[in-house]
Structures are given as structure tokens and as C-alpha cells.
Image (cartoon, grey):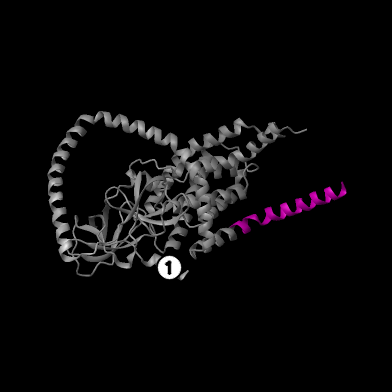
Amino acid sequence: MQQVNRVKSHLYHVKSFVQRFALILLIILSFGFMLLGKADNVIASSAQKILTAVMIPILQVVTVPVNAIKSYAGDVQELATLKEYNKNLLEQNQELQKYKKQAKKLLIENEKLAKLLNYKKPPMVKSIAAKVVADPGGAFAQSILVLAGSDDGVSKGDVVMGNEGLAGRVALVGTKASQVLLITDVNSRIPVFIEPNRYRAILIGDNTKKPQIIALPEKAEVNPGDKIVTSGDAGVFPAGIEIGIIESKKDGIIKVKTLVDRDRLDIVNVIDFGLKGILENLKCEQ
Amino acid sequence: MTTLYEIIKKFLYITAPFFMVVFLEMITVIPIRLPSFSMVSPPLALIPIYYWAVHNPWRFGIFSAFSCGFLMDVLTMNPLGINALIFTLLYYTVNQLRRFIAGKPFYVSWLGFSLFGTISLIIKWFLISLFSHNFGNFSIVLISAIFMIILYPLCALLCYSLIKISPEEDFE
């Protein structure tokens, strides 16, 4: 009995000691995590991967009612515009039929020419469609969590495409899910070409819907409507992927309207172009 | 003799505030797809952190605040430790000043949150900007703060309901 009391008293002292220094301890821990994360430490990324894997099933359950409401609201909206939608589809179909015939002709011609020139085709790209399960949003980070991980063949640095253009790249890969850094994130830097003059520049995110263009040559003349595509420099993104168009140019700040609409990003394509870029070199250095 | 039912009840009583913060963190990261909302979606988890620090600190301690912040870092892909630090500092500061807020009219609590919540977001913006060597757009931080302040009564009502569901007397 005396021993139990001694243990209890000892535990009480430990508890009060911890509580007294809890704030200092937790502040030190927080800064420790920040430094670990900054150094891209294996421990930090492993912790993130494990916790993300744990949270995925819970997130999927929580999203069920939200998706159901969205689906019903979408159905009601569709019903209201069904007639007009159908008319548009018929018009599009007629136009596409014309292109289909042209494409067939061009395909045959292309094959013949490739054979004549003994052209070596680039390797097939590997693409995975993945559902977006989390979209933290907010003013601090522009990232999404998609339901495809290393088990599905996703690897760090893979290109992520929305329906219309570039959405971002895979920043962290778990077994079942991956985190994608969007092109609008403040940490995103993408070497680009500005069409039609093919000026080289850098597209940087600023956590808003419209990223900016920097590092443009001094005498470069760009105008609203000019197309932005990846330049392929640094080897992270292949050249020629469409990103968006220049929306405005004011006081030296060039804003870009992205083709990908963040608010409609439900399913994305994770593509492995087989590039050996900066990310691969960094991996090797580690 | 303590029954299993009592043990479970006590466990739920102690952990419910923690799980409420986790639930609100989940709500924050669910893709809602309202036009432009993703840019300014408010960090709702700050509301229960503040609320528990004022009204029920014996059920939600500083370590719980830190853990919730760490989880938020993982979910939102912020640098690890940022939210953990913000949540811990908010909890500690508010807990130290709770005698000026607890038991006062609701608007005092709301005003207090408006002040501490906004300061928390500004500190977070500053830290993240330092980390990324790029000062992000400050106006969206303020819009996010306004949304958060507007939603305070709703989340506070949720927290209040939780206290009412499991009153303390049951466990004394």
C-alpha cells in the first residue's frame, strides 16, 4: 500500500512538472517538426504518409453525405438545362464527326511518314485516374489529396492533369493516397513558354486562383490572351502542356487564368511521363 | 465497481472535445466545390480550440491542442509544426485569459475569438511566408478570418451542445 502511494505521489510530481513545462516543450517540438520538414527529412515525410493513410478511410466516410448532397443538387440543375444541353451535344457531335474523318486520314498519313523516316516513337505515358478526396484550400496551401498511391504506381513528381490542363504535381506519395501540390500554391515554380513568341518565364503560385508570371525577358511583349505552356526546362514537367492564358497585365504584374478550374476538380489524371528531372536528381542525392 | 458502460461513457466524455476538433478539421478539408470557396475556406478547428480553452479546459488540454494542430498540418499539407504551434499558442494564451471571457455574455466570447483567431491566422501567414520565402496574398487571409468569425456562433453552439449532452455532474 505504501509503495502504491509512493508511485502515485511520484506520478503526481511528474505530471505537475510536465504541465509546468508543457508550453515550452510543445513550442520546441513544433519548431523541431518545422526544421525536420524543411530538411525534407525521411522521418517527417514518413509521419505524414502514415497519418494520411490513417485519415483516408475516415475522410471517405465523411465525404459521403457531402457528395450525396452535391449529386442531388447537380441532378436538379441538370434537369433544368437538359433540353439545351442535349441540343449542344447534338451540335458538338456533328462537328466531331467531321474531325473524326479528318483524324483517320491524318493517322494513316502519319503512320506512313513515320515508317518512311524510321521514326522512333516516344515511350507510352502511364496514366491513372484518381478521385480527389480532400481539398484543404484556405489561404495557406493549395494542395489536394487524391486516392491513388504507390500501390497504384504513383510516384513523387508525377504530373497531375485536370480535364483541361495542368493541375500540379505529386508531392508526397502514400500507399493508397498522394498529396498533390497545385500550380497555384505559393511553393509552385514552373518554367513556361509564353506563346506565340515563346518567351521563357517562370509561373509562380501565390495561393490565389490566378498565379503570376515572373522572370520574363526585359523586352518581351506579352498580351492578355497569350497562351502559357510548360517549357520542359528542369525536366519536372514535359514541354507543351497547356496551363492557361494571360488574363491581365497591370503594374508589371502578369496574372494567369488557369485552364483547370479548382472548384470542379473532382477527378484528376496522374501521369508518369518517365522524366528524369530535378526531383529524381534530388532523390539520388539523398 | 466500475462497469464497462461507465468506462466507455467516461472515455467518450473525456475524448469528445478532441474528436469534435478532428471532425471540424475533416469538414475543412472536404472538397465542397463552391465557386472560389477553396481559396478562403476558414480554418474551423480554431473555434473549438478557443472554446474549450475558455469553457472546458479540463476536458481538452494543451497536449490535445498540439495533437490537433499536428493532424491539421498533415491534412492541409502545411509545413509540419506550424498548426501545432498556432493551436498550442492559441490554447495557452486564451486559457490564461479565460477569467476575462468565461461566464460573460456571448458577444464577449465572440469578440475574444475575433481578436485571437485573427491574430492566429496572421501569425500562421507570417510563418508560412517565411518558410516558402514568398509572402502570399494577405487579403485572402483576412477574408478567411472574416468567414471564420461569422461561423463562430454556429461552431460554438455545437460545442455548447456537447457540454449539455454530457454534463460534468455525471462524472463527479
Place of residue A101 in the rendered image (x, y in percent of width and height, measured from the top left)? 13, 46
The structure residue drawn at horizontal position 24% and vertical position 60%, both measured from the top left corner, is: A240
- Asked whether, in this view, residue A105 is left or right of residue B158, the answer is left
Place of residue B167 in the rendered image (x, y in percent of width and height, measured from the top left)? 64, 32
Place of residue B61 in the rendered image (x, y in percent of width and height, measured from the top left)? 63, 47
Q: Of the residues shown, which amino acid type is indicated by label 1?
A: Leu
Q: Nearer the viewer, residue A41 or B101?
A: A41
| Residue corresponding to mark 1 | A282
The structure residue drawn at horizontal position 41% and vertical position 54%, both measured from the top left corner, is: A153
Examine the rendered structure and indicate whether residue B141 appears above or below residue A233. Answer: above
Q: How would you classify the magenta stretch by its main secondary structure?
A: helix
Q: Nearer the viewer, residue A230 or A110?
A: A110
The chain holding disc 1 is A
Q: Does the magenta portion include B72?
A: no
Start-end of magenta stretch: A1-26
Q: In which quadrant of the rendered view does residue A33 lie?
A: bottom right
The structure residue drawn at horizontal position 83% and vertical position 51%, both measured from the top left corner, is: A6
